[in-house]
Image (tube, helix red, strand yellow):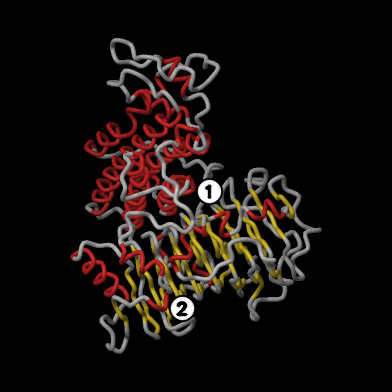
């Protein structure tokens, strides 16, 4: 995390080519300008009271009705832009469900337009020698993230269209998808800002920020109304032990099988005894094979013992990939990309997985860049319903990037120095060892830096029944904090865990001045060890102290990531609730 993404970017007038200017104007600036140009009337008593107001004869929607509809929406200009787009519609949305559906569809169109813009800008930068690789690479980050956002919004649109191939299990699914789509825009902005190329990237930063407003509105409408009759009607909710009807009998058998019973589709071995000698070749080969067979099913890749110098990216469209090694320290994947050498934090990962259903077992992931190279990710996960089991994640600053969606880590070791567990997923760590290691002279260690940017996101870090401490080579004078707020609504909970004497008595550290101290959510529950006393903890408004058992239950596997609904199919052990 090289920048403060909560800070407003510097706006500069940029000289851009006419084709790009027209793309920007058509896709983004014109609709927002239209919304801003209208004078708001005094809002009426309810933001749904005039949903049935008709448009006037020249197809301009009644302005008081728009103001009323957008009254309680967080980003009003984006809301007005949505409603002003309904020029051929005779009525405004009649209820929250209709407004939500329109909002998601509109966000989808905006994401698709943003993807076209990013692709155009990326090609423009590549064709000009004076442009550095940084701007082009950052735009590639945005393209990948926008493609993932389309996938998330498509999940919701498929459900709205009663697509039986994509059933909804709970409201948590929709909240997860919208939270991830919003996180993607923030990550795009971060990558662009890390380049320090404001002239080249400023237009895309503004586009991503505007897009985040549309998605944030969709999320707010859903969270405020998902329990109403309009939202509940027509949605089938599955019981905890029920498989969706679209899962084939063979897939159902695979889901019910334990990990040890699943046969590998590819074997990676450095000595040539497998089907492939590199992991990248195996991933590409499995993807091509499954595409030829119509896709679907779990893609199991067995990586034999050895050290593999590779950088791996499993994209959004490659789902259900499972990497199985021979054990921690035996199967090792090593990379060294880092911020100092020009990589974005997002692209510095040794292994990155965005496709849903990712599982890793018995593997060590390493970024060997060292403490002086700043951001250097060993493992980045943006996969929904992902599992990391009996693995080791080793780096220094930003070792583990829990980027987005729902994740579960069990019996996994995580090593790092600064913000070495960070991101904006909904993640539970259980029975894990979390170790701050020796850092640069004079540096402090921060275990977590959670990146929740919107109060309606269902994201946060839950560390449950783990050990948090320092490695034996860490300086005795080195101070370790449980976390600091990367973003305004940062949320982290430490529960029933052992905290050793390297933990600073204050527990938590500010990020910068008073930023987020009133809006964050940090809490603890029944921790033990010399670092567990809360008597000297920070006095911030956002620090909740020791939770009640009922409040802590919300951050368990069952309460926080809906683990009872999907973890049994992976064969991974887990504790659904609190221990004892």
Picture coordinates of residue 38, whole percent (x, y): 41, 18
In front of the other: 185 or 58: 58
SS at mark 2 in the image? loop
Residue holding disc 1: 458
Q: CA distance from mark 1 to mark 2?
A: 29 Å
Residue holding disc 2: 362
Binning the other alpha carbons within 10 Å of mark 2 as few (below 14), some (14 to 19) or many (20 upward) gives: many
The mark nearer the N terminus, 1 or 2, is: 2
Q: Residue at x 38, y 70 (%)?
A: 322
78, above or below 567, in the image: above
Q: Residue at x 30, y 58 (%)?
A: 317
Picture coordinates of residue 285, whole percent (x, y): 24, 72
Horizontal relation, residue 201 to residue 371: left or right: left
In front of the other: 547 or 473: 547
Horizontal relation, residue 469 to residue 412: left or right: right
Q: Residue at x 52, y 15 (%)?
A: 44
Picture coordinates of residue 90, whole percent (x, y): 31, 18
Residue 439 visible in this rendered orientation of the protein: no
Horizontal relation, residue 485 to residue 153: left or right: right
């Amino acid at each position: 995390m090289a920048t403060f993404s909560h800070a407003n970017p510097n706006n500069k007038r940029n000289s851009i080519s006419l084709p790009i200017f027209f793309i920007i104007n058509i896709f983004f600036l014109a609709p927002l300008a239209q919304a801003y140009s209208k004078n708001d009337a005094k809002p009426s008593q309810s933001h749904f009271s005039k949903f049935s107001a008709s448009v006037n004869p020249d197809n301009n929607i009644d302005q008081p009705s728009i103001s009323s509809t957008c009254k309680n929406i967080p980003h009003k200009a984006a809301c007005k832009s949505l409603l002003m787009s309904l020029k051929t519609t005779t009525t405004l949305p009649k209820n929250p469900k209709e407004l939500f559906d329109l909002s998601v569809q509109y966000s989808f169109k905006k994401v698709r337009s943003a993807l076209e813009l990013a692709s155009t800008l990326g090609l423009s930068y590549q064709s000009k020698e004076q442009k550095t690789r940084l701007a082009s690479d950052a735009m590639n980050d945005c393209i990948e993230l926008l493609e993932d956002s389309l996938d998330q919004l498509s999940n919701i649109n498929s459900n709205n269209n009663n697509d039986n191939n994509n059933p909804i299990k709970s409201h948590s699914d929709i909240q997860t998808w919208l939270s991830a789509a919003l996180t993607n825009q923030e990550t795009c902005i971060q990558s662009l800002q890390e380049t320090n190329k404001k002239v080249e990237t400023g237009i895309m930063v503004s586009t991503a920020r505007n897009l985040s407003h549309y998605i944030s509105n969709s999320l707010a409408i859903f969270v405020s109304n998902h329990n109403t009759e309009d939202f509940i009607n027509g949605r089938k909710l599955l019981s905890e032990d029920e498989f969706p009807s679209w899962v084939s009998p063979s897939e159902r058998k695979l889901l019910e099988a334990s990990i040890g019973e699943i046969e590998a589709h590819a074997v990676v071995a450095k000595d040539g005894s497998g089907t492939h000698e590199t992991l990248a070749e195996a991933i590409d080969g499995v993807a091509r094979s499954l595409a030829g067979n119509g896709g679907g099913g779990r893609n199991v890749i067995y990586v034999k013992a050895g050290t593999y110098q590779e950088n791996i990216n499993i994209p959004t469209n490659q789902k259900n990939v499972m990497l199985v090694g021979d054990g921690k320290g035996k199967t090792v994947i090593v990379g060294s990309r880092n911020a100092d050498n020009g990589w974005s934090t997002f692209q510095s990962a040794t292994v990155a997985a965005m496709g849903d259903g990712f599982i890793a077992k018995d593997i060590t992931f390493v970024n060997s860049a060292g403490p002086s190279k700043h951001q250097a990710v060993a493992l980045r996960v943006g996969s929904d319903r992902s599992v990391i089991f009996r693995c080791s994640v080793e780096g220094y600053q930003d070792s583990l990037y829990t980027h987005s969606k729902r994740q579960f880590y069990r019996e996994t070791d995580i090593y790092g120095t600064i913000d070495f567990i960070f991101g904006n997923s909904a993640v539970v760590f259980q029975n894990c060892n979390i170790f701050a290691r020796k850092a640069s002279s004079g540096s402090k260690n921060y275990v977590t830096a959670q990146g929740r940017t919107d109060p309606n996101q269902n994201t946060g870090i839950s560390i449950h029944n783990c050990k948090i401490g320092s490695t034996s080579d860490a300086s005795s004078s080195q101070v370790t904090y449980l976390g600091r707020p990367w973003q305004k609504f940062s949320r982290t909970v430490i529960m029933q865990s052992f905290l050793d004497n390297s933990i600073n008595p204050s527990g938590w550290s500010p990020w910068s001045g008073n930023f987020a101290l009133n809006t964050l959510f940090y809490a603890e529950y029944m921790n033990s060890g010399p670092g567990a006393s809360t008597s000297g903890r920070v006095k911030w408004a956002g620090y909740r102290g020791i939770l009640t058992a009922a409040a802590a239950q919300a951050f368990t596997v069952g309460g926080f990531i809906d683990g009872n609904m999907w973890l049994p199919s992976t064969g991974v052990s887990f504790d659904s609730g609190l221990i004892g």
